[in-house]
Image (spheres, helix red, strand yellow):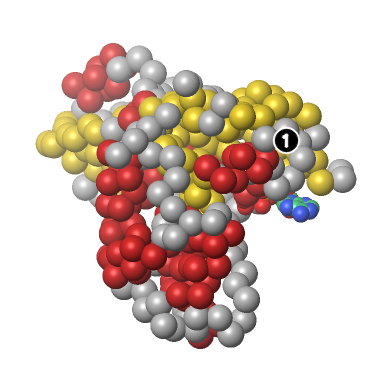
């Protein structure tokens, strides 16, 4: 069974589009990345999954439960990290964590302590004196301390330094190995590419691509770098061409034979072809209206 399923999910805020006709499936036990630039609709979809806002149309199920009807039950079984956490001023980290566990009627002290130590978060600090990263860490512990079977994390890494980001993803992978499903939104492509098995790309409220990250990144295109000269400018599969006195770099898609013929007719001293990274493919989709796969 899938951990998250949406069918034609649509949310309008009055006349403002939040998300439109989103159909998505997140398999259980998966680390799933939800990618899109600011304003694309990531938080809207996430808030709808948690029953925090009501869909205008369509349906969504989380852990087999309907997001409108079973909202309380879903919240009890999910760990949620909001994009912008607001804490009660004057409270210490320890008190925030205790309050969060208390709302679930759970004692999570041992887990909380272990997570704080791992993320180097001092539980005695006052939350309003923390940096953005410190507040993010507090939210992470709130979301993880009760060891939920599903984590829904809205831009979890903002404010974390690179070392901490690495630690955080290591933590997520450990949870995943124990069977936890992780759904995380991000506008940072490489972190999704390196950490998630599957991903969906959202633009202007609509899903423009979804699938295994390797397929999204590959999507048939190749990054080509050549040293020397070849007459490739007019080949239909070439895009993002950059030339230097030494050679050229470009993305290539479609039938490979015209490219090979052009290279053979030229004077090529060296050549590399590789899979482009997700960022290149993703930016291309954004520019040209999104082919999907
Ligand atoms: P993301 O999380 O990808 O940055 P959001 O889901 O926050 O995107 O926003 C999607 C669209 O919905 C944006 O145009 C945003 O302005 C609009 N929006 C989000 N929340 C609200 C709200 N509470 N009221 C009105 N419009 C909103």
Estimate the x, y position of residue 72 in percent, counting from the top left. 66, 43
Residue closer to the observer: 243 or 154: 154
> Residue at point 30% right, 53% down?
171
Q: Is residue 37 visible?
A: yes
Q: How many marks?
A: 1
Q: Is residue 132 visible?
A: no
Residue closer to the observer: 239 or 246: 239
Estimate the x, y position of residue 32 in percent, counting from the top left. 43, 37
Residue 91 picture quarter: bottom right
230 up-or-down from 44: above or below:
above
Residue that protrudes farthest toward the left in the picture:
269
Estimate the x, y position of residue 291 in percent, counting from the top left. 54, 25
- Give the residue at mark 1: 68
> Residue at point 27% right, 52% down?
170
Q: Is residue 287 left or right of residue 268?
A: right
Badge 1: residue crowd in 10 Å (few <14, some 14–19, many ≥20)? some
Residue 64 picture quarter: top right
Instruction: Determine if the C-beta at disc 1 is less than 8 A from ligand 1.
Output: no
245 up-or-down from 199: above or below:
below
Residue that protrudes farthest toward the right in the picture:
14
> Residue at point 48% right, 68% down?
97
Estimate the x, y position of residue 74 in percent, counting from the top left. 60, 40
């Amino acid at each position: 069974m899938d951990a998250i399923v949406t069918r034609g999910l649509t949310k309008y805020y009055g006349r403002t589009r939040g998300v439109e006709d989103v159909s998505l499936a997140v398999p259980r036990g998966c680390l799933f990345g939800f990618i899109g630039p600011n304003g694309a609709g990531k938080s809207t979809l996430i808030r709808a999954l948690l029953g925090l806002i009501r869909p205008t149309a369509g349906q969504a199920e989380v852990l087999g439960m309907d997001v409108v009807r079973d909202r309380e039950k879903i919240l009890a079984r999910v760990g949620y990290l909001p994009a912008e956490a607001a804490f009660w001023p004057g409270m210490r980290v320890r008190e925030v964590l205790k309050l969060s566990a208390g709302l679930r009627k759970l004692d999570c002290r041992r887990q909380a302590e272990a997570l704080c130590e791992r993320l180097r978060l001092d539980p005695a600090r006052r939350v309003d004196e923390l940096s953005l990263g410190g507040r993010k860490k507090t939210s992470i512990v709130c979301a993880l301390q009760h060891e939920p079977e599903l984590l829904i994390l809205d831009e979890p890494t903002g404010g974390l330094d690179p070392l901490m980001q690495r630690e955080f993803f290591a933590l997520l992978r450990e949870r995943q190995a124990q069977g936890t499903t992780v759904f995380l939104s991000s506008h940072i492509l490489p972190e999704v590419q390196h950490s998630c098995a599957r991903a969906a790309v959202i633009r202007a409220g609509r899903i423009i691509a979804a699938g295994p990250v390797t397929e999204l990144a590959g999507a048939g295109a190749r990054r080509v770098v050549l040293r020397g000269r070849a007459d490739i400018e007019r080949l239909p599969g070439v895009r993002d061409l950059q030339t230097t006195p030494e050679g050229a770099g470009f993305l290539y898609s479609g039938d490979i034979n015209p490219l090979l013929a052009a290279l053979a007719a030229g004077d090529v001293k060296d050549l590399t072809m590789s899979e482009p990274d997700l960022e290149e493919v993703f930016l291309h989709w954004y520019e040209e209206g999104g082919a999907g796969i």
